[in-house]
Image (spheres, grey):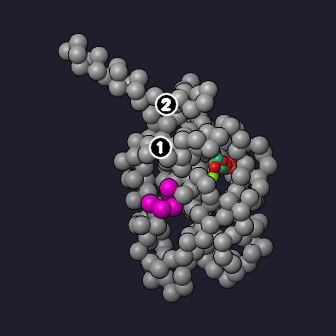
């Protein structure tokens, strides 16, 4: 008994992750993330079944790279991967200013687009992105996000596919970073209180 508790304590301690000055604790395990991705993939497959065009999956780099990769493996209609990079976060909060730091890798004129985001927080990125896609001449835009911080959301854009709603806390892992570290973690961690 003593040994088992002792082992659990050590495991808990070893599960914590320190990145720079901050400590993160386990939050969403990989298997749960896979379940969320299964769910959104099912919804998208249902909505795009029999598509005669080739819809575009638009990966918002860098955060969405893991999510987009997993999602695309589950899509069962012909689709094209396009990427762009949007930047707004420094450290653990948004700067309030969104910049497109890498242009679209292909034209989206006349194309149906499914935007894939790792997380929607304030929604500022989405607003900036919608404007870019309008100017670009996309024929239809749907938004798909793995995670959604509902209480932080300040935009009016409709979010069409949501993997999981989470509280307004800073998280790390599975593509999401803290000053560019932590993207390679398989699970998602949350900043310790
Ligand atoms: P928004 O523009 O405020 O909606 O923020 C969107 C972007 O900020 C996301 O695509 C992420 O790259 C980043 N972001 C938001 N919340 C977090 C977080 O908790 N951890 C790491 N990055 C985040
Ligand atoms: Mg992002």
- Looking at this view, name the residue that lies furthest to the top: 2
Residue 185: image tag: 1
Residue 78 placement, left or right of 131:
left
Mark 2 closeness class: few <14, some 14–19, many ≥20 residues within 10 Å? some
Q: Residue 114 occupies which quadrant of the picture? A: bottom right
Q: Position of residue 112 (x, y in %)?
A: 61, 77
Residue 158 placement, left or right of 163:
right
Residue at 77%, 66% (x, y): give it. 131
Q: Position of residue 1 (x, y in %)?
A: 20, 15
Q: Is the magenta stretch mostly helix, strand or loop?
A: helix
Residue at 38%, 53% (x, y): give it. 35
Q: What kind of element bears circle 2? A: strand
According to the picture, the residue beneath numbered tag 2 turns out to be: 17
Please say whether residue 147 is visible from this viewpoint.
no
Q: Is mark 2 within 8 Å of ligand 1?
A: no
Q: Where is residue 38 in the image (x, y as percent from the top left)?
A: 40, 59
Residue at 68%, 59% (x, y): give it. 85
Image height of 125 relative to 90, above or below: below
């Amino acid at each position: 008994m003593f040994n088992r508790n002792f082992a659990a304590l050590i495991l808990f301690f070893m599960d914590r992750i320190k990145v720079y000055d901050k400590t993160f604790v386990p939050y969403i395990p990989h298997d749960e993330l896979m379940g969320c991705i299964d769910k959104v993939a099912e919804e998208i497959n249902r909505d795009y079944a029999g598509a005669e065009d080739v819809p575009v999956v638009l990966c918002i780099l860098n955060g969405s790279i893991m999510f987009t990769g997993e999602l695309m493996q589950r899509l069962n209609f012909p689709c094209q991967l396009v990427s762009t990079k949007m930047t707004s976060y420094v450290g653990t909060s948004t700067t309030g200013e969104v910049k497109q730091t890498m242009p679209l890798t292909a034209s989206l004129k006349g194309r149906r687009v499914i935007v894939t985001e790792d997380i929607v927080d304030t929604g500022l990125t989405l607003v900036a992105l919608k404007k870019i896609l309008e100017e670009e001449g996309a024929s239809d835009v749907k938004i798909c996000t793995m995670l959604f911080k509902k209480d932080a959301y300040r935009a009016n854009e409709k979010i069409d596919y949501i993997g999981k709603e989470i509280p307004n806390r800073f998280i790390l892992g599975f593509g999401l970073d803290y000053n560019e570290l932590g993207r390679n973690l398989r699970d998602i961690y949350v900043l310790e209180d």
